């Protein structure tokens, strides 16, 4: 009986040591909004895939800030209630280990962890491409002849530049969470 208790005690001690020494894979998102006028509003952390009442997290804004914590790495969106989204842009974010700083505003951003830094760079590059593409498309509507050929050439250059950027980005990210997401979003099957 005493030998069994000692064995049980040793097993419990070993289990505690192993669990205490295993690296934590927790994420923390510290967020801010531009004003305390949003205090008391709910902010939601919604997984891109499999969102339901068990996987969506929510917190109230206090002192123009909010915090999410957890231990599941996945692509998510930080969002406010629908009416506030006119002022607080939704934010794509990776819930990866480490601390990410999120800023919700008319243009939202996130940084502080490797994948979120990469995702922010990708989002900014995508915005530039979309803006340039819209400009060229508007230009094409107002011209004809040789001028239209020049505009078409610019359109092709934008598409080529974005394609090259995405290919390089996906090669750098590999099969991590953000790489997998961008690959699905862009339909790029190359690794």
Image (spheres, rainbow, N blue to C red):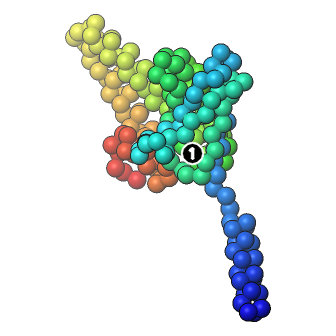
Categorize mark 1 by other alpha carbons within 10 Å: few (<14), some (14-19), many (20+). Answer: many
| Quarter the N terminus occupies | bottom right
Rendering coords of residue 141 (x, y %): 27, 10
**Residue tagged 1:** 95
* Residue 64 versus residue 21 in the image, above or below: above
Residue 190, position as x, y percentages in the image: 36, 51
Q: Is residue 124 visible?
A: no
Q: Spot the residue most to the top.
A: 142
Q: Residue at x 37, y 21 (%)?
A: 133
Q: Residue at x 75, y 76 (%)?
A: 13
Q: Provide residue 181's location: percent of width, then percent of height.
A: 43, 45
On screen, 38 above or below 115?
above
User: Residue sitting at 50 percent across and 24 percent down?
Assistant: 81
Q: Position of residue 126 (x, y in %)?
A: 45, 30
| Number of marks | 1
In the visual, does 61 lie left or right of 187?
right
Q: Is residue 148 left or right of residue 171?
A: left
Q: Nearer the viewer, residue 156 or 79?
A: 79
Determine if residue 74 is in view.
yes
**Which residue ends up furthest to the left in the rendered image?**
145
Q: Quadrant of residue 52?
A: top left
Q: Tag 1's secondary structure?
A: loop
Question: Is residue 49 shown above or below 21?
Answer: above
């Amino acid at each position: 009986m005493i030998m069994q208790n000692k064995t049980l005690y040793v097993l419990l001690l070993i289990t505690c040591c192993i669990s205490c020494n295993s690296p934590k894979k927790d994420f923390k998102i510290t967020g801010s909004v531009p004003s305390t006028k949003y205090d008391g509003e709910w902010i939601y952390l919604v997984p891109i895939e499999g969102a339901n009442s068990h996987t969506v997290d929510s917190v109230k804004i206090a002192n123009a800030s909010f915090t999410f914590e957890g231990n599941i790495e996945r692509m998510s969106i930080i969002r406010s209630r629908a009416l506030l989204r006119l002022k607080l842009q939704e934010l794509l974010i990776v819930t990866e280990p480490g601390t990410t700083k999120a800023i919700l505003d008319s243009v939202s951003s996130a940084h502080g962890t490797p994948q979120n830094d990469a995702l922010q760079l990708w989002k900014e590059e995508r915005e530039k491409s979309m803006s340039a593409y819209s400009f060229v498309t508007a230009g094409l509507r107002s011209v004809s002849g040789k001028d239209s050929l020049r505009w078409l050439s610019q359109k092709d250059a934008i598409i080529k530049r974005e394609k090259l950027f995405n290919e390089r980005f996906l090669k750098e990210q590999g099969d991590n969470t953000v790489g997998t997401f961008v690959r699905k979003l862009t339909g790029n099957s190359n690794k």
